[in-house]
Image (tube, helix red, strand yellow):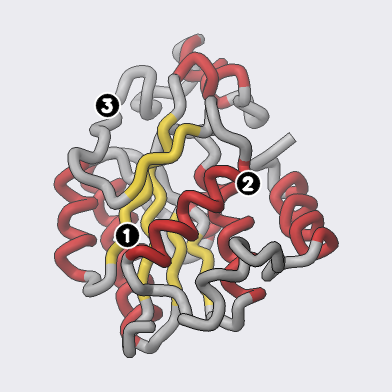
Amino acid sequence: MSNKGFTVWMTGLPSSGKSTLAGLLAAELQGRGLPVVNLDGDEVRMRLSKGLGFSKEDRDENIRRISYVARVASDMGGVAITSAISPYREIRDEARAEIAQFVEVFVSCPVEVCIQRDVKGLYKKALAGEIKGFTGIDDPYEEPLNPELVVHTDLESEQESIDNILGTLDRLGLLPKNETNSRATGASAVSDDEREQALTKLRGLGYVE
């Protein structure tokens, strides 16, 4: 593994599955002994970026703050997982330039499917005009041009997406050597109980049903 840590930057539409995958990936990597910080977009908004609005300037500032924390965690040898929408390509490229080991994962999902998954009712409010500047409705989402990985959460199971992410991290030489073949040999780094605990927490936060 590299002397430095790395950042897994998940980007995608609201309700595409970013937070769900981030929580499961965090549990998987922690089970492999890696120090992980999970920078969930909603939690960052409540804590690190409290007071910021949703203008482009404020959204960019929010992403810069996430990028800074991710860089510090990575530079200290940890793993940072981000799951903010980060809709604008330019600010994501800025984060890439700042973070040495940057793995961009595009969590792809058609907006129609995201609307069906909308447990918070935000798409419904945006379509009714109650929320302005909502990404995917009346504010743009700029898809990554060259991400390290694209996962299709409308076509893949959660486990398939996680396996694809782990495979990419392995290919990039970012996983500990003694752990890279754990799935191939049938060994699970995270128990069923640990996985269910992660999902329970995500359900409690309203990220998954």
Name the residue rendered at 40%, 86% in the picture: 77
- Rendering quarter of residue 62: bottom left
Question: Which quadrant is home to the N terminus?
Answer: bottom left
Question: Cα distance, mark 2 to mark 3?
Answer: 29 Å
Q: Position of residue 188 (x, y in %)?
A: 71, 65
Q: Left or right: 48 with respect to 179?
A: left
The tag earlier along the polypeptide, 1 or 3, is 1
- Which mark is in front, 1 or 3? 1
Asked if residue 129 can be seen in this view, the reply is yes
The residue beneath circle 2 is: 159
Residue 145: percent from left, percent from top = 19, 39
Instruction: Give the residue type at disc 3.
Output: Pro
Residue position marked by numbered label 1 in the rendering:
103
Residue 86 occupies quadrant: top left
Q: Please, which residue is most extreme toward the front here? A: 185
Side of 7 where 114 appears, left or right:
right
Mark 1: amino acid: Val
